[in-house]
Amino acid sequence: MQYETRQSPDAFVLNPAATATASVIWMHGLGADGADFLPLVPQLQLPDSVAPRFIFPNAPVRPVTVNNGLSMRAWYDIYSLGIREREDAAGIRASSAAVHALIDLECAAGISTRRIVLAGFSQGGAIALQAGVRYPQALAGILALSTYLPLAASLAGEATAANRAIPILMCHGLHDPVVPLALARQSFAALKAQGYAPQLLEYPMQHSLCAEEVLAISAWLVQVLPPV
């Protein structure tokens, strides 16, 4: 699959050579930017029959408390190393709304919501989960890498019926020092308790991706974005 890269201040976009029939909106981690996962796309080796457009938005630049107030790209503030001890609800909700707006733009471009995947790594994965289960129309799936479920206590009251059956793939490192595996497992259990059917794959790695995981992601994308 050949892609053409387009860059703007807000995002990096990879358009397939063929007409896009699906979209993957992929959020980066804390301190990175939309370019972070560009090299991953060729590694996925997706068949031409899938032909998704990849959108890698840039998070806004903001001070991050846990990093001594240093300004960097972040989807929301993190107040302490205990990620869930106190959450930046306003920042999380604002970034979720921004992702919803990106979904709406893809719909306006002719992509059905049922062929839109939300993906993200670490902080970006938290936003993918937050935005995906709260979007009012059915999406194709949520890919949550090395991350956790934010604002878990509000999920029951805010989740939309349209995405109760959404496919959710979570991948996590057994030795992750940034987002502990226990937190991913708690998030997995919380989703199951609310009636979702997430899949959690664990790998012998830290806060990163591995080759086996990339293969699993590719197979999952082909599954949730079948040829049209």
Image (spheres, rainbow, N blue to C red):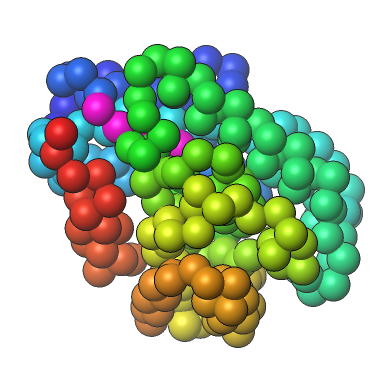
Between 63 and 120, which is closer to the camera in this rendering?
120
Residue at left offset 30%, top offset 32%: 22
How many numbered discs, if any?
0
Spot occupied by residue 25 in the image (x, y as percentages of width and height): 45, 37
Q: Does the magenta stretch include residue 13?
A: no
- Position of 198 compared to 225: left or right? right
Q: Is the magenta region chiefly helix, strand or loop?
A: strand
- Note whether 60 is above or below 37 in the view shown: above
Relative horizontal placement of residue 49, taking residue 110 as reference (left or right): left
**Which range of residues does the magenta coloring cover?**
21-25
Location of residue 184 by image quarter: bottom right
The answer to which quarter of the image holds residue 47 is top left
Instruction: Based on the picture, tell me whether residue 24 belongs to the magenta stretch.
Output: yes
x and y percentages locating residue 156 in the rendered image: 69, 64
In the rendered image, the vertical position of residue 218 relative to residue 26, given as above or below:
below
Residue 202 visible in the shown view: yes
Q: Residue most toward the front?
A: 161
Quarter that holds the N terminus: top left
* Residue projecting furthest to the left: 48
